[in-house]
Amino acid sequence: MKYERKISEAVIKRLPRYYRFLEDLMNMGISRVSSKDLSVRTGLNPSQIRQDFYCFGGFGLQGYGYDVEFLFNEIKKILGLDAINNIVIIGAGNIGQALAKYFPQQKKGFKAVGIFDVKPSILGAKIGELEIQHVDKMGDCIRENNVKIAAITVPSLYAREAVDMAIKQGIKGIWNFAPTELKEVPDVVIENIHLIDSLMVLGYKVNNN
Amino acid sequence: MKYERKISEAVIKRLPRYYRFLEDLMNMGISRVSSKDLSVRTGLNPSQIRQDFYCFGGFGLQGYGYDVEFLFNEIKKILGLDAINNIVIIGAGNIGQALAKYFPQQKKGFKAVGIFDVKPSILGAKIGELEIQHVDKMGDCIRENNVKIAAITVPSLYAREAVDMAIKQGIKGIWNFAPTELKEVPDVVIENIHLIDSLMVLGYKVNNN
DNA sequence: TAGATTGTTAATCGATTAACAATC
DNA sequence: TAGATTGTTAATCGATTAACAATC
């Protein structure tokens, strides 16, 4: 079965983009799309688009194209967005609070179920629907809500510690916002959002265009 | 001259990482590093590291390695971090406010000099050192501070409009936080931070590990 | 049926890695 | 000088793109 083969990172990274565009098409009432159409809209090569879907067995019909809703739902399933994905946020600073407000109710398949910190002065404060709790309470929250993903929004210096703690409580995915490289841990996946890095790349391009 | 050749995207994206590691080395008082050392620390292949620096003419000494401070400063110059890079933030929602607090005073070479919105109820509010101003004032701010980069943190629906406005006022780089694909504009560089996409990729990996 | 467009293999392209001569 | 490690070219690998037979 095609699913068995390892899907490359490059392909996975394009899936959310397809997903977004297909959602737009659905909202526009378009029910059918060809790889050529999608190419024009996404800027990707039509061969690449077909190749990407082919990794999962292919979702189209020769001579017709792709059914928008069907394709949308297939990608939804692949990305695991048909289930509830609960996340916890470690660190209730600027970014942590912004995330807590951003994922209130299963926004796009993800939902923040807890935000944690250690700073006494902010414990108990309400961020949207959530209350900032002490990290000591995190283990319970993770187990009760079957949480697999933790967003790390603490200062770099404490990132390692926060990650170790999260993994000990059963977390399998780290969404890291600290501008530091976290050491790989077996069976745990790390996805970095290095804002500064991204801004530096942009700065370079602006100055060298 | 080597600088003239087009540097690939992949190389540029690794530069901030080198920069961060070299800063760490400096803080640890380490003055000399080989590509093999850097390889162990960054997880990158030593050949790749040398190849990357070779793109810019090479910064090392045969039989010795690289001088940490020299290399750090060269990368700093390449990334344009030896100058002040002012940015404006369009959209004073959760993310916009978090960014404004994150770049108060030339943090890592970048400085937010203005944050703009249209919502009357929040205009005038202080975010750290900055006051939320109406977007009508943005043009003046961009010219006065020679701003080249705008962070877009408005809802997707208004992203296109915000970008057009920014470009009209002379912006050359768009740091886009709206979960939408912006159409390419000649002479303007776009760098996307698609938080949802990143989280979806993480979710996929967690479920398929 | 004829036309369209996928699924799938093959070719190309670019990025990563290996190798080693140059040289400090 | 001998050892180390870069600069630089060559080989490998993987991702992208092209081509076209299959088939709706």
Image (spheres, coloured by chain):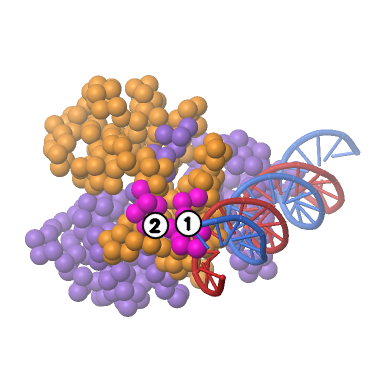
Chain colours: A orange, B purple, C red, D blue
Where residue A141 sits in the image (x, y, percent)?
24, 25
Residue positioned most to the bottom? B168
Instruction: Find the magenta span and give its range.
Output: A58-73
Q: Amino acid at mark 2?
A: Asp
Between B129 and C1, the one lying in front of the other is C1
Q: Is residue B125 left or right of residue B77?
A: left
Residue A176 seen anywhere in this rendered image of the structure: no
Are the two marked residues, 1 and 2, in contact with CB atoms closer than 8 angstroms? yes
The answer to whether residue B204 is magenta is no
Give the residue drawn at x 20%, y 73%. Answer: B137
* Amino acid type, mark 1: Leu
The local secondary structure at tag 2 comes to strand
Where residue B23 appears, as percent x and y from the top left, is 49, 44
Q: Residue at x 40, y 47 (%)?
A: A75
Say if labels 1 and 2 share a chain.
Answer: yes
**Residue behind mark 2:** A67
Q: Residues within 10 Å of mark 1 (few under 14, many from 20)?
A: few
